[in-house]
Amino acid sequence: MKWVYHACRVIFGAWWLFSGLMHFIWPQLQPLGDEQPAIDFTLALMASGLFDWIKVIEVVLGLTMLANRAMPLTLVALIPLNIVIVYWNFVLDEGAVEWTFGALSIVFNAVLVWPWRRYFWGLFTWRGQPDYSLDPGIA
Amino acid sequence: MRWLYHFVRLFTAVWFLYAGLNFFFYPDNQRLGLVPASHDFTVALIASGLFAWIKAIEVVLGITLLVHRFMPLSVLALVPINFVIVYYNWVLEPHRGTYIAGGLTFAFTAYLVWSWRAHFWPLLALRGAPHHDLKPHFTTIRETGDAAS
């Protein structure tokens, strides 16, 4: 399984790094989508300025994935962005290419999350006890 | 600090529950924004269909915060939603009222994250110790204490 993880990490990391950098280096290449809902959504994101922030985060996450560092935090940050990407590919801009990219995003995410699962089980605590103090409590 | 935690939790819960349910029960009351930047952004989100999903998540998070269950996951799910809410308030529609709303959103989220920090410290591991086998390894990193940061 180790080589599958590293293959997904490097491919996904390079994909995100390229996708993030492309927005700043070659903005004219930024795909807006083929169908109107996808185009409208992408243009609205760009007009709001949020798209720049998303692309900066993509660059940072691409670098951390390629370097295989800060992976638990990287994966937690990947998930909300990938939910929007998968929604864009499956709902807003339907088509064979978009479905393939959407499905690949899900698969890559799942393969990358699995080896780090011990870091995430604690998040599924049903009751838990908050810490009311100001002590950082770093173990 | 216990009362402060529960005040912040309940305030956020009611706020999210109201904002989420309002969209489904009284869609005409949905605030679209007062300036073109915020208005266009909200309208595009609604048109994409993503807004309905965000509102459904707001309802779920409102309930989990209210009943004080699944808190680490709920607080983590709050972060990206509140990031956009703060951006909307501070950047897209800046005026005194939205500065206060954005500030409260930021402060309340930060405080809830702080209260559950024990669950989040392991996520900051720089190197970490991945497990490449297929066993679930339900023992969390907090219990084994080998976050290997």
Image (tube, coloured by chain):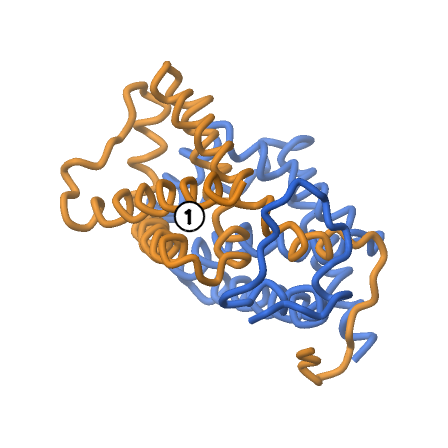
| Along the viewing direction, whichever of B45 and A104 lies nearer the viewer | A104
Q: What residue appears at the point 63 percent right and 55 percent down from the top-left corner?
A: B76
| Along the viewing direction, whichever of A74 and A90 lies nearer the viewer | A74
Q: In this view, does B99 lie to the left or right of B110?
A: left
Vertical side of A66 occupied by A70: above or below: below
Task: Say which quarter of the image contains residue A119.
Answer: bottom right
Q: Inspect the image, locate mark 1, and give the three-letter code of the amino acid beneath it.
A: Leu
In the rendered image of the structure, the colour used to display chain B is blue
Q: What residue appears at the point 66 percent right and 79 percent down from the top-left corner?
A: A138
Disc 1 designates what residue?
A: B34
Vertical side of A67 occupied by A137: above or below: below
Q: Is residue B121 left or right of residue A40?
A: right
Tell me residue B146's x, y (percent).
67, 69
| Along the viewing direction, whichever of A96 and B140 lies nearer the viewer | B140
Tell me residue B107's x, y (percent).
59, 70
The quarter of the picture where the C terminus of chain A appears is bottom right
Vertical side of A125 occupied by B109: above or below: below
Tell me residue A88's x, y (percent).
42, 29
Residue that lies at the very extreme toward the top in this rendered image: A96
